[in-house]
Structures are given as structure tokens and as C-alpha cells.
Amino acid sequence: MEKNFEPKKSEKKIYENWIEKDYFHADSNSEKESFTISMPPPNITGELHMGHALNLTLQDILTRFKRMQGYNTLWLPGTDHASISTELKIVDSLKKEGKTKQDLGRDKFLKRAWEWKEKYGSLIVNQCKSLGISTDWNRENFTMSKELSLAVETSFINLYKKGYIYKGEKLINWCPKCKTTISDAEVEHLENNAKIYYLKYSVAGTKDFLTFATTRPETLLGDTSLAVNPKDERYKKYIGKKAIIPFINREIPILSDEYVDMEFGTGVVKITPAHDFNDYEIGIKHGLPMINILNDDATINENGKTYSGLDRYIAREKILQDFKSINQFVLEKDLQNSIGVHEKCETILEPLLKTQWFVKMKDFVKPCIDAYESGNLNFYPQRFSKIYLNWLENIHDWCISRQLWWGHRIPAYYCECSHITVGTNITDCEKCNSKNIKQDEDVLDTWFSSALWPFSTLGWPEQTQDLKTFFPTNVLVTGPDIIFFWVVRMVFSSIEHTGKLPFKDVILNGIVRDENGRKMSKSLGNGINPLEIIEKYGTDSLRLTLVIGSSLGMDQRFYIEKVEANRNFLNKIWNAARFIEMNQDKNLEFDISKTDFSIFEKFSTVDKWILNKFNNLVKEITTNIENYDFGMAIGKIYDFTWNEYCDWYIEISKQNLKNENLKENTLYTLKYILINILKVLHPYVPFITEEIFINIQKVEPTIVLSSWPKIQNYNFEKEEQIIENIKDIIKKIRNIRHDMNVEQSKKISITFVLENNFSIFEDSKEYFKSLAGANRINIIDIKNNKNIDKNAVEIQIESGFVYLENLVDIEKEIQRLQKEKQNIIKELDRATKMLNNPEFLSKAKEFLIEKEKAKIINFNDLLNKINYRLDTYLETEND
RNA sequence: GGUCGCUUAGCUCAGUUGGGAGAGCGCCUGCCUUACAAGCAGGAUGUCGCAGGUUCAAGUCCUGCAGUGACCACCA
């Protein structure tokens, strides 16, 4: 093995080998229980960012873990056509050539879009691969593939036939730049410093004026009434009269409605039903006419009379000027409000009246809520269920038609007889059989196809073997920001089309931020490219960094020092493997995959200690990972590997390897534990574990298909306790050496004066020599009157005393003992108080009471010993 | 306005059912001890945001407050 692991050299080769051997392929005819994850398909416009890296790492950890546990594991990958995002990019690229999409026409445009898909779709896929993800590439899919397009059409037709999809004229969000409708979920609300203007209309047949407040004066061209609160004494007399919009000279009714807030503004509201969602409701309620005053590019249309042709904001200025000129402008004020913009292009949206396709959502709400409340759908962390529920409770019908070209064209055909035929491969009108039919020009919202992803990718609407075997999927891993875009829609679509929930558990990952806690963004230029981290530190270091010391659903900061620390950890494991390789003995080759655990009974105490600790580790982390506590599990593995296996077991093994009687079992244990560490690490850091596994294990061809360590029924608690005690004593000795400024190279003499446990210390002599820097070890029975150097430092242990000779600084030792004495007195005091408390005795758990009682005994013992020793020193000093 | 987070060592963060506060980085001291200087050994540092409450026992549960962040909904 090389001195250091070089990710750049190995990772690509390893991944190619995995793919070539088809290790990630899931068999739909397998007898084994299946475990399935549908990968949230990245957009073909996208490039790999830290969010993907985290999201994919979490999925890969779960997938590899389940695969090792023996499940028939499928992680199904793919990409999303990302209708509007992709179309915008292509329009942009056309613009650079001086062309528009209309110049090309629909067919040529789509051809170009498919070229884009071929080029950039594979780019993101390859970037994902560099993360080492164990997805089944045989089943890779794309939201606009033939099969998935059929699924989309089938879904649309089903929903239409059941009356859940309808076409209707409603107020929708319109993006004047993209010239398409968008759904509620795609509207982003931004804080805005606006102005509110007070203007007035004259009241017909009187000399009075009514003053109202508005932030969008241009919409008054579409006003169809003024409204006041029925309880408002100020305006009662005007109700039923007419107000006059100047310049366009339209008379509009003055009506009353509870909706009007008497406190806000003047208490008079202008009502523009065609351009405001609240006004729209009032318009319907009172049967007001709805006048659309905007063209699709947000210029004023012919209904705006003299203002027609002007841009919406230029019209606004002109209207204000004109109101001033006739003295119907009252005042203007600053106002903090929020404006709705299109999340893709940041253009300020306009509510417009349009005829569009909608999905009626009302009937889907209950099944979606029931799924959660019955416990069949779970969120991790659970609090995210609130976002899910809250969205459902306030749901509106889903506008699914988009005035775009790149996407699934709506399968609705219009006949000259005015009948609409909805279906696949339609050639003639279902009503009059006319062949003169025209397909709807619009495409579907990109989320309409994503909503089907978990089952469409498995073959739905066909009842394929894949669908039977792998659906419903088990887990969805995604970001909380798309709970309502995607999660809700998958749930209701799946219930509706398959009768089943699409998945059982939803895991929400947090946001990866920069080192200052800011969101990584292109405009700030603070993004850290995962590919650069991989290039420099390797995929494994990156993956570790994203999961270690973090918890689910929490945002985290990404900083390079953390990557380095994790790289160092991987280096540590690499070197542990090198140590084993260097000590391998050709005459002692074992296949640890065939371990018969009864052999461990004959192993040494220290072997049993590490075996027992490892067994407990497996127990804990298996539970942790099953509960999706990925950070917790890796933290424990990290700690075990470095602080137990490397720092203690390997160090001790160096002594045991010199002993011919212990050598074989020691080598066995070294290898057994290392390989099992590799296994529990493998879901997190797949590459380095594979590389070492192949180098050391030499029996199985890959760690990918190896089995997760099983919890063994051996119990070496006693041995574990013995070695923990020895570790404590060694630590105390090291501590004293350091306190007394004993040089590292200086050897000391240690004398154990014992009441019992002679053999334990006899067996551990070499450990003390190498780990505590001793050259002479004496073991004496306490009954044989001790003859110890009075200047020796004494350590009090349970089974007796430890004396360190050749240490001179008695003053320091007295200080140390006095400090320790203070600590013990404090502890004794605390334990005594607890035990004197009748409430504690009657209410606390039994084992806790026993623990405190044991403490009192031990501490009193130690205290006596310390006092005795202090007396001895003081006597010596007085001599 | 509503909902949900966060506040723990100098920094970044863990902390599973309430039962003596942890990690990584940084800092201090000493070591090139042939697996690893990307390392080894030792060390220092915390009224767990504030105030109440429940409990024998609270970083952990409840209430309020303060700071901070996210999301949702918005009054024209």
C-alpha cells in the first residue's frame, strides 16, 4: 500500500469497476425484501452544488447500508426536463444569436431543446457520479422519456375523466417576461419599499369626491367599483351611488362589503377584479364586470383607452400626473409591502384573467392529511409535517398549463364543433369524428410529471414487475423548500393513480451555507463547488464533511478546515490498514468472512475488550442509521476508530505481536476489527473503504456487496471493564509524568501493590512498559509488608496501589494529591447529599441509587489512601 | 400577522427516553516513540440566551421575555 490514499488515482477506477460489474443493479424478481429510493431528479439545466452533494450523500448512505443489510436495494436515478428553466436558458442562448423562439418555430425549438438535454443532461449525471452514488443506472430515466410521457398523458386523462382536471377562466399569476402563467407555489414574495397614493373619484350627481388609496394606480383603468365597509358612518350615504373614473369616463357603483378595513387608508377601496386576487373575490360576490386592461407583456391594452400601448409603470406615472392636473391627486406616502415576483426571473407578476387548465385540489386534501395522521407517512424531523399540513389546509386549485413549448404538451384536442377531446394519439373528434382538430398549444407545469416520478419510473401505468417489486418506495430524501411543490403533489398523485402512498418516510435535509452562514448563491459568488473539493480532497472527505457533526433538517456551514480534518481521519484509517499489512504473516492468513465466533473465547483480554466495544458500537449505530441519525452514527464510528482502535488497540497489539503465543489471535483481531470498521464506514466513505477492503480482505471481491456486521451474542463485559481500568491507570501515570516534567524518553519503575487481580497486572506488564514509559514492573501482594521508596508517587486504585519510582518532585506530588483530595471531597459531598434525600431514595431509579452508594464506598477508600499518603510525605519532609 | 427553528468552550457545531456537559478546529506544554507530523502524549476554557415553573433531579419538559433566522400569508 502507498503511504497515503490518493483519491484522484483510485476513485474513478473504483466507480467504473462498480458500474462494469453492475453491483448496483436491483433484480425485480428477487425473493428478498426490497428497499427503494427514488432519486429527486436534478434539472438538466443544473450543475452539481453542495445541496445536491448533501442530498445524494444521505441517499447513498441509506442505500449502501440497506444493501449491506441484505435488502434487494434499488436507488433509481434520473433527470428532470425542468420545463421553464430549460426553456429560459434556450431562449437566452437564442438571444445571443439574435433570434427569438418564434423565429425558430415550435419544431425547431424543440429540436434544439433536445440537443440541450443530450448535452447538459449527461453533464449533471456525470457530476453526480463523481459522488460515488450507488444508483442503478440501468433504470435511469428522464421526465420526458417516451414511457414517462405516456404516464403523464395517462394521468392527465384519468384526472380529466374523473372531473379533477378542468379548463376555466380564472385570475392567475402571469409573468410578463416569460409570458406564461405560473402556479401559486412559484410566486416569491419580496419585501418592497413602495409608495401608496391617495386619489379621488367624483361621486356622480354630487359635488363630493371619494378618496381611496392604492399602490398600483394604473389598475384603476380596470376598476369596476368602489367599496366601503357597511358600518362606516362616513360613507353610508354614498352606498348605491356611482363614482366616475376620470379620463376614461366610466361610472362605477359604490358598494359595501365587510371585507373593507375602515382603519386602513381612507376606508374606501377601489375594486379591480381582473387584476387583484382579493378584488376578484369581491367581483364574483357582487357580480361585477371584470375588465382586463393588460396585454401579455404588461403594456396597457385597448381597454385603457388613451393609455393603451404604454408600459404598466409608465402608465402609472402618467395617470398620477393626470390626476394632479385635475386636482384629484391627494397625497403619496411610503409603504412597506411585499410584491410577488416570478422565482425564476424575478419579474414582478401581474394577476391576469386567463383561460387555463387546473387541477381541482379540494378532494385530495383529506387523503393527504389522513396519510400523515394515520402514521403511514412520516417526516424526519417531524416538525416539517407542519409545512405539509399547512400547505394542504390552504390549498388552491393548481394551475397546470404553461404557455411554453418545452414540456409535455397538453393532450387536449379542439374540434371545429367546439368539442374538446382528451386522450392519447387522438386523430379525430370523439363527438363529431371530424379530423379537423388541433392540439392545445400549452404544456404542463413541470411538477405535473415530477408528481408521478416514484411510480412512473417503475413502469406505471403498466403493471410491471418493477412496480410490483419496488413500489411503494421506502424513503424520499429532499429539501424542505419543495414540500409543497413536490412532496404534496407526489402524495396525492400516487394515492389517486396507484391507491398507495409513494413512500413511507420523508427525510428533509438542510441547506449547506458558506462559512459565514450565508446561502451559497451565484450572485454573491460565495458558492463552493463540490467538484473542486473532490478534486483536491477526494469524494470521501467531502461526503464525511457533509454528515459528520450535523443533524437532519438543520442548515450547516461548510468550511475547508472541516474537510481537512476529515481527510486526516481517512488518512488515519489508511495507515491503520498499512500497519496491518506490514505485520501480515504469510503463515497466518485467515478468512475473517468465515469467522466462527466461538474462537474468541480463547482470545486475550484486550482482544475481547475491543471485540466487545465493537459489538456495542454496531448495536448503537445500526439503530441510529435506521432512525436516520446519520451524524450520530458516524460520530460514534469516528470515535471508536480513532480513540479506541487506533490509539489503544493497535498500540497494545504492538506488544502482543512480539509474543508468539498471542500473535495469531492478535493479528486475527486486528484484521477482524479493521474490516468491520471498513464495513460500517462504507456507506459514508465508499471509495477508501473499497480500496482497503480489496487490499486487506482478499476473499470477497468488493465491500459493496459484503454484509453489514451482525450483532454477536458473545459478552465480554468483564474483559472490557478490565482493560478500561488499565487504560485509566495508564492515563493517570502519563498525566503524572507530564505534571512532573518527566522527559518522554525517561523510563520509570512501577510497583503494583495489590490485594487481588494479580494476573491482570501480570498480563498487562508490557502495556505499562510501552504505553506508560516504564522499564521495571514489580507486583507485590499487599499482605507482604511493602517496602516502597518513600519518595515514590502513589496512585490509588481499586485493587490496591501503584507506585511510581524515580520521580523526584515531591512538592508537586503533594499539590497534585491535595487537588485530587478536594475533588473527591466534593464528589463525596454531592453523593452524600443525594443519599440523604428521602425523596431521591424513594423516587429515583434503583440503579442510580446503587451507583451513588458505590461511589461513597469507593471515594471513601480513595480518600483514606490519599490522606495516608499525604501524611507519609509530610513526615518525610519533617525528617 | 401566522407558523417553525436557533441561542451550549475563542470559532463551527453535536448532545436519542430528564440522572454528573462533548467533538472538530484553534490555543498552551512536551515528543520525528519505524502505521500515520494529515501524527503521538498531556492541558486550559462553559452561571448550556434571560426569568419563572414542573420534578428528588432540567442543556433536555412547560410558560413568558430577548436576540436571530427561515417559511407562509398579506391591507387596498
Image (spheres, rainbow, N blue to C red):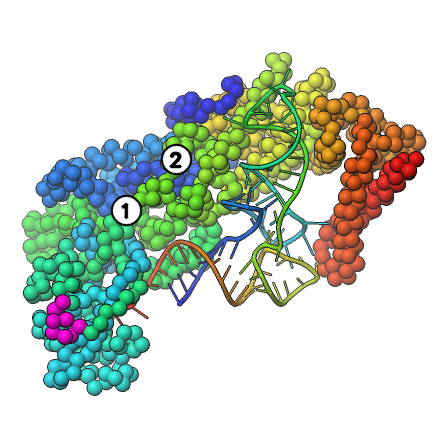
Q: Would you say residue A522 is visible in this rendering?
A: yes
- For residue A399, which quarter of the picture? bottom left
Left or right of A101: which side holds A743? right
> How would you rate the neighbour count of disc 1 (Cα within 10 Å): few for under 14, some for 14-19, many for 20 or more?
many
Amino acid at pointer 2: Pro
Which residues fall within the magenta stretch? A321-329
Left or right of A489: which side holds A858? right
State how far apart marks 1 and 2 are (Cα): 29 Å
Please name the residue that numbered disc 2 is placed on: A530
Q: Earlier in the sequence, mark 1 or mark 2?
A: 1
Residue located at (36% from left, 59% from top): A391
Residue located at (28% from left, 66% from top): A334
Residue A9 located within the stretch drawn in magenta: no
Please name the residue that numbered disc 1 is placed on: A449
Instruction: Say if A799 sits above or below A223 in the image.
Output: above
Mark 2 belongs to which subunit?
A: A
The picture places residue A546, in percent across and down from the top left corner, at: 46, 39
Residue located at (25% from left, 44% from top): A85
The picture places residue A424, in percent across and down from the top left corner, at: 19, 46
Amino acid at pointer 1: Ser
- For residue A870, which quarter of the picture? top right
Mark 1 belongs to which subunit?
A: A
Tag 1's secondary structure? helix
The picture places residue A383, in percent across and down from the top left corner, at: 46, 55
> How would you rate the neighbour count of disc 2 (Cα within 10 Å): few for under 14, some for 14-19, many for 20 or more?
many
Q: Would you say residue A850 is visible in this rendering?
A: no
- Is there one chain holding both mark 1 and mark 2? yes
Left or right of A871: which side holds A845? left
